[in-house]
């Protein structure tokens, strides 16, 4: 394998860190969205519920920071060519899913941050309270949380397409697409 057969190592590490953070964030966000605050408290108690909310917010801020680094590494370093090249359909689907995932993974935490701040809730990164992006405005908060939830489901669809594409290349086409993002050379 040549050095240009895969992304630079920091970009590959960022890919897997974002993947892990996104899956944890989606799991906690969908749980909280489905159950709501009161039902979550009744099931696991106030302390654990608050911890779950703090963890979800922390993951969102972490995803925003990691995605910023991913975009920088994507722009700054060579993107390896596909060998063998993708056909036109594969290239269009791959590029579309990747660009939509990048956009969604940047917009999602920003929506959550704005929704939280406009709802009058603390925006937390671990134990630190971050400044709100906007002032308190409950009606806007409600709308932003709805969009945040919809975007969460869109990200689930995009991740599913991404994983299905990776599995298709790995198990059916048996080309070298999977090695481009592997942590192991």
Image (cartoon, rainbow, N blue to C red):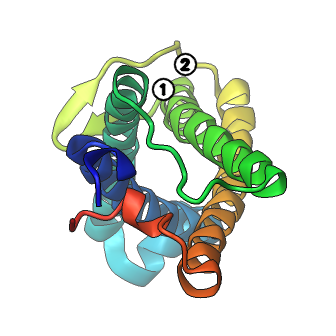
Query: Which quadrant: the C terminus?
Result: bottom left
Asked which quadrant contains residue 36, the reply is bottom right
Q: Residue furthest bottom?
A: 171
Residue 95 in view of the camera: yes
The image position of residue 120, as x and y in percent, is 48, 28
Q: Residue at x 65, y 74 (%)?
A: 164
- Using a 10 Å C-alpha cutoff, classify the residue at mark 2 as few (fewer than 14 neighbours), some (14 to 19) or many (20 or more): some
The image position of residue 108, as x and y in percent, is 57, 39
Say if 96 sits above or below 153 in the image.
above
Q: Residue at x 39, y 31 (%)?
A: 78
How many numbered markers are drawn?
2
Q: Residue at x 51, y 44 (%)?
A: 81
The image position of residue 61, as x and y in percent, is 35, 37
Q: Secondary structure at mark 2?
A: loop
Asked which quadrant contains residue 4, the reply is top left
Q: Are marks 1 and 2 in contact (CB under 8 Å)?
A: yes
Q: Residue at x 18, y 32 (%)?
A: 128
- What's the distance in space between the residues labelled 1 and 2, CA to CA? 6 Å
Question: Which residue position is annotated with label 2?
Answer: 136
Q: Which mark is residue 149?
A: none
Q: Nearer the viewer, residue 166 or 122?
A: 166
| Residue 140 relative to residue 56: left or right | right
- Comes first in the chain, label 1 or label 2: 1
Q: Which mark is residue 117?
A: 1
Say if 132 sits above or below 71 in the image.
above
């Amino acid at each position: 394998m040549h050095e240009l057969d895969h992304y630079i190592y920091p970009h590959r590490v960022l890919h897997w860190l974002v993947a892990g953070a996104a899956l944890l964030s989606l799991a906690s966000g969908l749980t909280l969205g489905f159950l709501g605050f009161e039902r979550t408290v009744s099931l696991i108690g106030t302390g654990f519920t608050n911890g779950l909310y703090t963890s979800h917010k922390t993951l969102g801020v972490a995803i925003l920071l990691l995605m910023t680094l991913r975009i920088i590494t994507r722009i700054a370093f060579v993107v390896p060519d596909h060998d063998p090249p993708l056909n036109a359909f594969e290239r269009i689907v791959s590029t579309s899913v990747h660009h939509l995932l990048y956009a969604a993974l940047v917009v999602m935490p920003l929506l959550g941050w704005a929704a939280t701040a406009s709802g009058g809730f603390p925006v937390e990164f671990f134990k630190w309270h971050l400044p709100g992006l906007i002032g308190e405005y409950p009606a806007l908060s409600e709308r932003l949380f709805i969009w945040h939830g919809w975007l969460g489901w869109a990200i689930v669809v995009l991740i599913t397409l991404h994983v299905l594409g990776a599995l298709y290349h790995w198990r059916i086409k048996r080309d070298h697409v999977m090695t481009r993002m592997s942590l192991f050379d």
